[in-house]
Amino acid sequence: MNETLNLVIGLSMGLNLVAVGSSRLPMLIRAMSLQGVVLGVIPLLLENAQFDWRVVGVALATMVVKGVVIPSLLRRAMRAANIDREIEPFIGFVPSLLLGAGGTIAAVALALNLPLLPEHAKTLLVPGSLASMLTGFILLIGRSKAISQVCGYLILENGIYLFGMLLIQSTPLLVESGILLDVTVGVFVIGIIVDRIQRAFDSLDTRKLTALRE
Amino acid sequence: MIIIANLILRLAFWLLLAPLLPGVINKVKAWVAGRRGPPVLQLYYDLAKLWRKGVVMSELASPGFIIGPAVAWVALLSSALLMPLGPAGSVLSFRGDVLLLIYLLALARFSIAWAAMETGSAFEGMGTAREVSYAVLGETAIITAVLALIVHSGSVSLITMLSPAAGAGVALLAAGLFIVLLAENCRVPFDDPNTHLELTMVHEVMILDHSGPPLAVILHGASIKLLLFTLLLVQVVLPVGEMSPFIATGVLAAGVLVVTVGVGLVESLLARLAFRRVPLLLTAAFLLCLFALLVVWKGRGQ
């Protein structure tokens, strides 16, 4: 069971790097949503989780929202804004790929030194979650288009979700569904904002949003 | 006596079989495109034709114009002799021969680059600059891959490095090495062997001024290099060294065929990358090898 779990989390770490290295927005959105689906499977793989309707519910809701709803909202915003690639990011693709890889390695090294419970120490749950958070931060800081930054935020959320898997037994279903709802509404609102930015500035470059005008 | 017979057999294997691979790749490409394509043995005909032709030498070129290809060919052939062939092992095996292999490949590249710049043509300088700058990244990846194999097997000689079954992380290592294979042999996402538009060529532009026997030697060397990388990839993935000789021959042949057909399919289905995107793909290859190294390292510690 641990082997499968580690494989799945390793896959999500790989998807982090795909997201950080791709300049095309559809690719970025695909990597982000695939990561959401992959992470949605994890509650079913956890060793100590009983197979009850609650866990299955969390898994299904996560997969549907992160794999279908959010990507389709983002794709609609992307089409409305008429852009499909990140042209000049603040941090170039090769440096951000290297940063992402360095962050992943650092996350693994850090998790080795954390005082974790013995049943968590053997899995990649904690390093995988830290790596996703770092990747999310790199995308948030390093990209200039609003949609890429949203994807960074969603990858960051994936990392936090993965961390929450440590406590799945004691978190009420309400919390999980509340987080999912928040994220969906957030992306929905961002979709509208992206459209407004595009109309007001003729560009989605967030650099143009830093100065105030009369 | 046995050693000499062994050596001759191996030389015959590398010299005679290597030009088959580009033919297979071209056949696959033609098949995917729905054409009949050149015969599989086309490179043999080309080499025979080139060997009979004369050499056109620029007045500016020093003897390095001829010496470069010759040195490159000898370096590639000697690195091929270091490469073990399944249970048959290699002619010459010693501690650290893998380093010699890497350096011989670098020497071959240097000599070709040297010969390319001899005529003073601006295009060849441009192609050389591109080839060498890709090589910097490709070599980082291959050295990392070798490091992963060394940590996995605990040995620095090729024959013991390649014989144990590659453990966890073999998929990462295979993907990384496949990308390096494409880059080192100037195949499609990095360079198009069919293009003859000066501005987009990489390897082809380096050999533009060579003709006759030196060109034949360069082409033959390139095919040896392709076979070398293919065999390396197959032996990294499969524990060929531990099989019985009969099965190992079949497995090696099948593996080489699969990799070659794979190269042909990649070449048919992908367009070449823009130049500024190439470092990204090579960095990805380096990272794949790096993560394979980490997986091996972590697996060994437990």
Image (spheres, coloured by chain):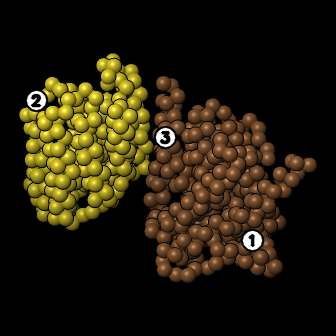
Chain colours: A yellow, B brown
Residue A188 placement (x, y as % from top left): 11, 52
Is disc 3 placed on a helix, strand or loop?
A: loop
Going 88% across and 51% down the picture, which residue do you hit? B4
Q: Residue at x 28, y 54 (%)?
A: A30
Badge 3 sits on which subunit? Answer: B
The answer to whether A208 appears left or right of B110 in the picture is left
In front here: B213 or B236? B236
Q: Which mark is residue B216?
A: 1
> Which x, y percent locates residue B30?
53, 76
Residue under pointer 3: B169
Q: Using the numbered discs, state the Cα–Cα distance from disc 3 to disc 2 in whole angstroms.
A: 37 Å
Q: Quadrant of residue A86?
A: bottom left
Q: Residue A87 appears at what percent x and percent y?
A: 33, 59
Please name the amino acid that badge 3 sits on: Gly
- Is there one chain holding both mark 1 and mark 2? no
Q: Nearer the viewer, residue A165 or B165?
A: B165
Q: Is residue B91 left or right of residue B259?
A: right
Q: Write down the residue under mark 2.
A: A172
Q: In the rendered image, which quarter is residue B122 located in? A: bottom right
Q: Quadrant of residue B26?
A: bottom right
In which quadrant is the C terminus of chain A drawn? Answer: bottom left
Residue under the point 37% across and 26% down = A122
Chain on which label 2 sits: A
In whole angstroms, how far apart are the C-alphas of marks 1 and 2? 72 Å
Task: Give above or below for B22 relative to B287.
Answer: below
Q: Earlier in the sequence, mark 1 or mark 3?
A: 3
